[in-house]
Every structure is written in structure tokens, then in C-alpha cells.
Image (cartoon, rainbow, N blue to C red):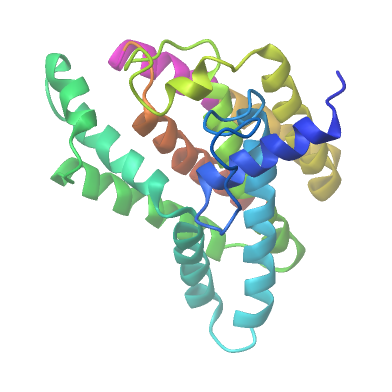
Amino acid sequence: MVIAFRDLLAAVLDALRFLTRLPVPTPQPGAEGGGAPHPWTMAMFPVVGLFLGAILWSASAVFERLLPHGVVDLLLLGLLALLSGAIHWDGLIDTADALGVPAARRAEVLRDVHAGSFGVVALAFVLGIQWAALASLSGWLHGAALLLFPLWGRWLMVAVSWNMADLRQGGGLAGAFLSHLDRRQLAWASGGSAVLSVLLLGLIGGVLLCALLALAAWGLRIGYRRLFGGLSGDPIGAACVLGEAAALVVLAGLG
């Protein structure tokens, strides 16, 4: 499965534009690829996660000289939210709020931009898990976790999106990605994430992380189908935060 370098670069840049608030140049209107995301954009979501993880790893090296370990980890989670525009936190809040109402109103609540009590509690709980798991790590494993947990969170976005119905039927932002996602892209995203995990954690640790995240993706796909009947942008964003938390819990267990 070979991808031309030009297509690879275009997909990575589109993924950076979509998943971060970094100043990535936008294609001019009318230019090739201008407007719609590259078909392989979602396959590059884990690449963006690795890039964000590298920023966190670099920031950690500076912060650790000045502040206690636990404070540093909390600041790193805040930095990740800042770099991504907190769009995944918003997705978790809206998704949790939608689960707090009858099924007939869930699609309506997903479109509501206001945060409810269910969403705030869910965000506090999941971020608390992320912080506690990250703060429990030290040394090499802490550095590996900083690289891997943003990567696996964005991999989970790809895994839950594959072959799922679009709740907005093309009317939302997620439809442009869901319509292009296929098995080749899922394989690309999964293979790269798995190889890097094995390189950083060793064979047993890497395989265990991959297996447990795959199990999390399977469970979340079943849950989304039963609870929503498909996907929109908010549940996909929620998958990112949940995937980050799951990866950190597994890594804490390895520590």
C-alpha cells in the first residue's frame, strides 16, 4: 500500500489543520485540494497525535526543571487542550450530555453548544483519570507515555469512525471524513501506531497496549451504535479523550 509523498503531505497538513490550532497554511480557494479534506486525512490522525506528543515531551523536559512532577503533568494536559483548541473536550461534554436525556432527544443535545451537568462531570472524571495515570509514571515510561497517549487517542477516532453511519447525513463536519474512510486507511493508522508502540515499549508492552486499545475501540463502536445509531463530530471527539485516558491507564499498569 504505497501513498505518493504529495498525497501524504497533503493529508498530514489537512489533519493538522483539523485537529490543532497550529498556524498551518490553508490552500487557496480553487487550488487543488482546496476546500474538502484530503481523502487520506483521517489515516494521518495518529501522526498528528505523535507530533503533539513530541511537543508535550519537549515541554516536559523544561517544566520538570522548575515545577513538581504532578503540577507538570497537569500543565501538559492543559497544553494539549490548548494546542487542539479543546475540541475533543467539547465533544466529550456534548456526548455525555446526550446520554443524560431520552434517546429521542440525543441528536438534538449533540447539536447544542451549551455544557450541561453530565458533560462537566464526565470531563472532570476523565481528565482526573488522565492526570492520575500520567502522574504515576516516571522516567522512560513517562516520556513514552507523552508520545503515545495523544497518538492512541487520535487512533481511536479513526477506529470508531470506520464503517459507521453519519448521523448528520453529510450535513456536519464529520461527514467529509466518514465518507472517505476505508479499511486501507484504518490499516495504515493501526500499523504505524502499533509499530511505534512496540519500539517504545518492547514487544510485550506494545502488543498489550495495542490489544487493549483495540478492545476499547470495539466496545465504543458497539456503544455508539446502540446509543446513537451512528456518529457525528462530538462522539468522535469524545473517542479521542477516552482513547487518551485508556492508553494512559494501560501505561500506568505497565509501570
Is residue 253 in view?
A: no
Q: Judge from the rendering whether residue 231 lies leftward or rightward of residue 207; answer left or right.
A: left
Q: Indicate the position of residue 43 as horizontal and vertical percent values.
A: 67, 29
Is residue 83 in view?
A: yes
The answer to whether residue 223 is magenta is yes
Q: Indicate the position of residue 205 as horizontal and vertical percent values.
A: 76, 41
Q: Quadrant of the C terminus?
A: bottom right
Q: Residue at x 84, y 35 (%)?
A: 5
Frontmost residue, 115 versus 100: 115
Q: Judge from the rendering whether residue 5 lies leftward or rightward of residue 90; answer left or right.
A: right
Main secondary structure type of the part rendered in magenta: helix
Q: Quadrant of residue 63?
A: bottom right
71 in relation to 42, above or below: below
The answer to whether residue 182 is magenta is no
- Which residue reaches farthest front? 30
Q: Indicate the position of residue 52 as horizontal and vertical percent values.
A: 62, 55
Q: Judge from the rendering whether residue 111 lies leftward or rightward of residue 24; answer left or right.
A: left
Q: Residue at x 63, y 23 (%)?
A: 39
168 in relation to 9, above or below: above
Q: Residue at x 45, y 34 (%)?
A: 239
Q: Indicate the position of residue 223 as horizontal and vertical percent values.
A: 38, 18
87 in relation to 212, above or below: below
Task: Identify the magenta region.
Answer: 216-228
